[in-house]
Image (spheres, rainbow, N blue to C red):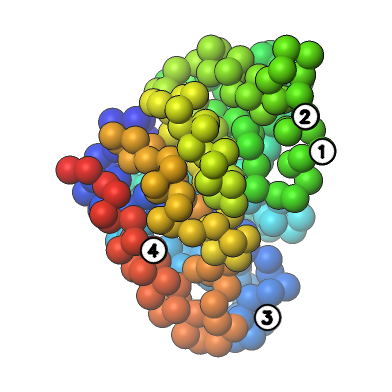
Amino acid sequence: MNRAQLVAAIRGKKSMLCVGLDTDPTALPAHFSGKENAVFEFNRQIIDATREFAVSYKLNTAFYEAQGLRGWEALEQTRQYIGTDCLTIADAKRGDIGNTAKQYAKTFFQTYPFDAVTIAPYMGEDSVAPFLEFSGKWGIVLGLTSNKGNADFQLLETVGGERVYETVLRKTASWGTPENLMFVVGATNPDGLRYIRNLLPEHFFLVPGVGAQGGDVPSVCEAGCNADGGLLINVSRGICSLSKGEDFAEKAHEAARDYQREMARWVRS
């Protein structure tokens, strides 16, 4: 899904919702116990319940990799089921150099052909560039994250007076374009989000941290929206983990609808 298609989806659905499928097989509703292919079946029902409100789905690959071959199969089944009308994100946070980075890019853009993959940029340009060589695909680089440990490195000042995350954003933005680069910017720091929007007015941001981590849609949209929407607001537990009963999909539908309604007023036609 390229930028024009993503913007069209946002405007068509009046939504910037990204549903996070961090599916832990040990935490599924009880009626999935003992079922073959339980992870994919859970994901399928969540997708069916939220598709009319979501423009993107983000699969945290750690939850699938931990299951071995069965997990990889569930990952690919889920990606295929989502189809092409929503942006698919492999939240893999890969970061390595040279031929290794090229293999990671092939993994998530060819073998498992997602639209986007998250990237850790700590090793520099050669760890990011291979992901930007695929037409119509996106690299999503970690910028200012929403976790408590972000202050350990991201908020430190460099010799030139910039904070580390500012240097990462500025340098990385020069390696690609708003057509193939997004950045992860957490919802829990609206002032930081506003600052980064001023720094990068055209890029899309993947915004985790709404819901369980304390971020909220109005603050995120006020600080980060641009003319194209410019945000993929990720919600995982706040949609997928609302019930341990057989009504889990119904609860997911209601939550996704409520999030979409909050976002609609920020989407320009």
Q: Dividing the picture into quarters, in which one does residue 121 lie?
A: top right
Q: CA distance from mark 1 to mark 4?
A: 32 Å
Name the amino acid, label 4: Tyr
Q: Position of residue 146 (x, y in %)?
A: 65, 48
Which is nearer the N-term, disc 1 or disc 3? 3
Q: Position of residue 135 (x, y in %)?
A: 42, 21
Q: How many residues crowd around disc 4 within 10 Å: few (fewer than 14), some, or many (20 or more)?
A: many
Q: Which residue is mark 3?
A: 34
Is 263 placed above or below 122 here?
below
Q: Position of residue 86 (x, y in %)?
A: 37, 47
Q: Are the residues at dot 1 and dot 3 in contact (C-beta closer than 8 Å)? A: no
Name the amino acid, label 3: Gly
| Residue drawn at (59%, 47%) of the image | 189
Q: Which residue is mark 2?
A: 156
Q: Which one is closest to the eye, mark 3 or mark 2?
A: 2
Q: Which one is closest to the eye, mark 1 or mark 3?
A: 1
Q: CA distance from mark 3 to mark 4?
A: 33 Å
Asked whether residue 264 is in view, the answer is: yes
Q: Which mark is residue 259?
A: 4
| Residue drawn at (39%, 47%) of the image | 222
Q: CA distance from mark 2 to mark 4?
A: 34 Å
Which is nearer the N-term, disc 2 or disc 4? 2
- Disc 3 element: loop
Q: Which residue is mark 1?
A: 152
Which is nearer the N-term, disc 3 or disc 2? 3
